[in-house]
Amino acid sequence: MTRIASTLLTAATLCVALAACGEKPQTGGAVKHDAAPYAGTGSNFTQAGWTAGDKTSWEQQLRTRQQYGQNEYSRNQKP
């Protein structure tokens, strides 16, 4: 009888220990709305010609950057 009781006690202890290791629920708080990307970050390290908060200058900078700065195909094709 004591052997069965000790086995049940050990099993119950293991169940409680494993239940304590469970993951806590990941409930988010309020919905966070980020600012528009062209609003800027307030950093002093910005591209010349881009004005923070101006969507058209942001789009122009992206087009220029894609065409000349980060497009490896066009960069390698220049004579």
Image: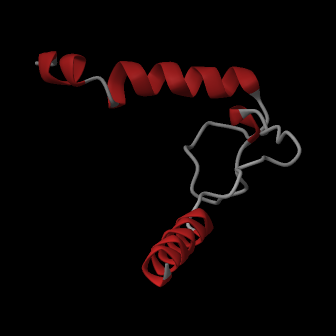
Q: Is residue 73 above or below residue 4?
A: above
Residue in the image at 49% along x and 18% along y = 63
Residue 7: x and y in percent read 45, 74
Q: Is residue 20 left or right of residue 63?
A: right
Residue lying furthest front: 1
Q: Is residue 21 left or right of residue 71?
A: right
Q: Nearer the viewer, residue 40 or 5?
A: 5
Q: How is the image coloured?
A: secondary structure
Residue in the image at 64% along x and 28% along y = 58
Q: Is residue 31 left or right of residue 62?
A: right
Residue lying furthest left: 79
Q: Nearer the viewer, residue 21 or 57?
A: 21
Total numbered circles: 0
Residue in the image at 16% along x and 18% along y = 78
Residue 44: x and y in percent read 64, 60
Q: Nearer the viewer, residue 50 or 32?
A: 32
Residue 53: x and y in percent read 79, 36
Residue in the image at 33% along x and 30% along y = 70
State which quadrant residue 47 falls in.
Answer: top right
Q: Is residue 5 above or below residue 45?
A: below
Residue 19: x and y in percent read 60, 63
Q: Quadrant of the C terminus?
A: top left
